[in-house]
Amino acid sequence: MGIEDRPAEAGDRPAKAGDEPALGNQAPAGEAPTSAGVDEDAEASTGGGATDGAEAQPSSALAALSGDQSAVGQMRAEFQRRSRAFVDGLNRIRGFSARMPGGAFYVFANITGTGWPSKRLANALLEEGGVAALSGTAFGSYGEGYLRFSVANSMENLMEALKRIEVWAAANL
């Protein structure tokens, strides 16, 4: 349903010449803007006025960098686990070989053993196997003979992708 197809709601009015689009907390013509996002009780207790929040609170970036980093380590370990499982799986499929990535959540697999050009193989895996991979040639001519796979997915989906690649390879290589 597009916006023009939606039923009218209370407060809807036809646009008039000279109307400006409402953005953020701008009020319709003739009405005072609201102070969305401003805690007036907090202002009263601190003596502050309306601010963008930068003076009243530490920045989110600072909090992210100086706060608990355990989640980062857990995420890194999980991506390494997924990468290892995917690399091991690819290395069991005829024509494919891969090494552990050095820190990315992509596996750049060598597919020269398949005898297929990168772009053609990427398209065949997508169209016939339902697995998305990016041709190495997307990174330049030296990428011929490689496919890039993302491991930024669930372990279940990665294992399903390996199964589909293996079935496709058994039928086509």
Image: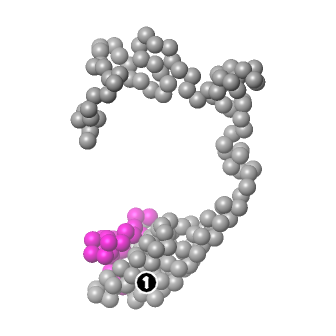
Seen at 48% across and 28% down, the residue is 24
Expressed as whole percent of the image width and height from the top left, the position of residue 2 reads 26, 39
Q: Secondary structure at mark 1?
A: loop
In terms of image quadrants, where is residue 48? top right
Expressed as whole percent of the image width and height from the top left, the position of residue 55 reads 72, 30
Q: In the rendered view, would you say 51 is above or below 126?
A: above
Q: Residue furthest left?
A: 5
In the rendered view, does 81 fall on the left or right side of 22? right
Expressed as whole percent of the image width and height from the top left, the position of residue 62 reads 71, 44
- Can the viewer see residue 159 in this picture? yes
Q: Which residues are magenta?
A: 114-139
Seen at 73% across and 55% down, the residue is 68
Q: Residue furthest top?
A: 30
* Front in this rendered view, residue 75 or 109: 75
| 125 in the magenta segment | yes
In the rendered view, does 110 fall on the left or right side of 78? left
Seen at 47% across and 21% down, the residue is 26
| 42 in the magenta segment | no
- Can the viewer see residue 112 in this picture? no
Seen at 26% across and 32% down, the residue is 7
Q: Quadrant of the N terminus?
A: top left
In the rendered view, does 81 fall on the left or right side of 16? right
Q: In the rendered view, would you say 36 is above or below 127?
A: above
Q: Amino acid at mark 1?
A: Phe
* Front in this rendered view, residue 67 or 122: 67
Expressed as whole percent of the image width and height from the top left, the position of residue 116 reads 33, 80
Magenta part, dominant SS: helix
Which residue matches tag 1? 96
In terms of image quadrants, where is residue 125? bottom left
Q: In the rendered view, would you say 2 is above or below 87?
A: above
In terms of image quadrants, where is residue 166? bottom left
- Colour basis: one colour
